[in-house]
Image (cartoon, rainbow, N blue to C red):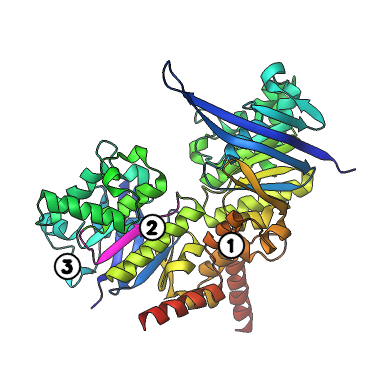
Amino acid sequence: MPLLEIRNLTVAFDTSAGLFKAVEGIDLSIEPREVLAIVGESGSGKSVAMLAVMGLLPNTATVTADVMRFEGKDLLSMSPSQRRHIIGKDIAMIFQEPIASLNPCFTVGFQLTETLAEHTELNARERHERALELLRLVGIPDPELRMGSYPHQMSGGQCQRVMIAIAISCNPKLLIADEPTTALDVTIQKQILDLLMRLQAEHGMGLIMITHDMGVVAETADRVVVQYKGRKMEEADVLSLFESPQSAYTKALLSSLPENATGARLSTVAEYMAEVERQEAEAARIAGEVL
Amino acid sequence: MADIVLETRNITRDYVSGGGLFTPQRVVHALKGIDLTLERGKTLAVVGESGCGKSTLARIITMIDAPTSGELIIDGEKVDIAHHGVSKELRRKVQIVFQNPYGSLNPRQKIGDVLAEPLLLNTAMPAAERRDRAMQMLLKVGLQPEHFNRYPHMFSGGQRQRIAIARALMLNPSFLVLDEPVSALDLSVQAQILNLLKDLQDEFNLTYVFISHDLSVVRYIADEVMVMYYGEVVERGSRDEVFANPQHPYTKTLFAATPRADVDHIKARLARKASVEA
């Protein structure tokens, strides 16, 4: 049974210019212990789809889906309180801006134990112990001292480690990481990715990586979903995606990587898509002449 | 003789903080003696992580801040802004493009006015000519005439970065400092901006100081690479030298940490994973 199964997910926003569909008919499923990457540019609806799973969208959004199940339980029909038992406990999420997603008014220790108080039966002392253990697990030096620190006293990389510690505090079955390293330096990015992959393997979590960085995809994913303008363009295992991309958009995306530059110019997605359309029109014209 | 546009000799910059009646001052040495020379028409990439002093260096060579010690030489002329200030002529010679195109454009100013303002401030050009020049530059960076009277919020991130580049080029600068110009942009838009920068460089023989932490971008655009670490230059050389044979341990760490999107690399990772699971 898949861990998370989504079929025909559509998210529409009510705007002054009418209904805007950010996600249109996305199918997605992830198995236990699998690492799935969702790739796309900004505006491709990759974050919105996952926020819909978490139930974190504002009420201007309309979420519809044929199926949205977590471990066989239907997320759409359950009551908000039932859903809150799953969100934060079995499904956890970390966000792009680590410093902005921690509450600046509370200590790291408080924010860590808050989740534990909500979802577990541990008493205050056990919660404190567990929080220390988590900080050690994510590689924060001097955890005793850090429990009393505020987010602004720590670096971006350390804040992201704390976010990860909060997310994994209740041993989630599925972790959704929304651009977890975009705001970080390459060397710190490497550490955070290594940490995520280690935790994923040790705890047997499913992991969904939302990213626009093909390098991060290549370093982490088992399977990849490519999204463009709210639609799924391609789904493949990581090796076939890089070896033989099927959709025109994926090919365009890969050829615009600076390391794949051939000659002096980078090909851009817009140019590539225009070329594809031109060729298709040409083919149609020739087909018409033959007939 | 090579045409040297920018030269720095042993530039240092200290930031002093704290220091009350009973507490000692704290001094941060942001730059510890930077030497560089840059030829006309070339691109120098400055690489390093946050806190290594690359933005401090950018502020010094754009004459926003004065160095604590050392010499800054622009177009063969010694510059000392701490004691003599900066002339309009010098301001014209050095321009900068910032990382975040959402923050660097005035939301209340139309694009045409954004582009004409450098001319208004620095030259005695009549209004009609300023407008013409602004329009020419707008077309040059790949935007349309109808964009002239629009406001920044009507543009996407990539278009705004084009506007920022156009504004920097209005005064025919000797060199352009690009402070992480593509880090905030999507992959496909990033490719367009990099192409634009290369085209403009070919056309106007521009000189770039390209500040970045993204090695794949640096490899694409740079002629020379300078790696900084804690305020010091740990490695410098031509792009091919540095990428083919990095010498300093920090440069090697940086290369190792950069995610790679090639098939062999993925195969190796999957094989490693399979062997761990077996």
Contact (Cβ within 8 Å) of mark 1 with mark 3: no
Task: Answer few, some or many: residues within 10 Å of disc 2's Cα (few below 14, many 20 plus, some between 14 and 19).
Answer: many
Q: Secondary structure at mark 2?
A: loop
Lower position in the chain sequence, tag 1 or tag 3: 3
| Chain to which the residue tagged by mark 2 belongs | A
Residue at figure coordinates x 61%, y 39% from the top left? B163
Check disc 1 and report the residue beneath it. Answer: A257
Residue at figure coordinates x 31%, y 72% from the top left? A30
| Chain to which the residue tagged by mark 1 belongs | A
Check disc 2 and report the residue beneath it. Answer: A45
Check disc 3 and report the residue beneath it. Answer: A74
Q: Are marks 1 and 3 on the same chain?
A: yes
Task: Answer few, some or many: residues within 10 Å of disc 1's Cα (few below 14, many 20 plus, some between 14 and 19).
Answer: many
Lower position in the chain sequence, tag 1 or tag 2: 2
Q: CA distance from mark 1 to mark 2?
A: 21 Å
Residue B239, position as x, y percentages in the image: 71, 56
Observer able to see residue A246: no
Residue at figure coordinates x 60%, y 79% from the top left? A288
Would you say residue A173 sits in the magenta stretch? yes
Q: Amino acid at mark 2?
A: Gly
Q: Amino acid at mark 1?
A: Leu
Q: Nearer the viewer, residue A153 or A60?
A: A153
Residue A275, position as x, y percentages in the image: 62, 66
A39 relative to A75 in the view: left or right:
right
- Point out the stretch of residues depicted in magenta: A170-183
Quarter of the image for the C terminus of chain A: give it.
Answer: bottom right
Q: Main secondary structure of the magenta part?
A: loop
Q: Amino acid at mark 3?
A: Asp
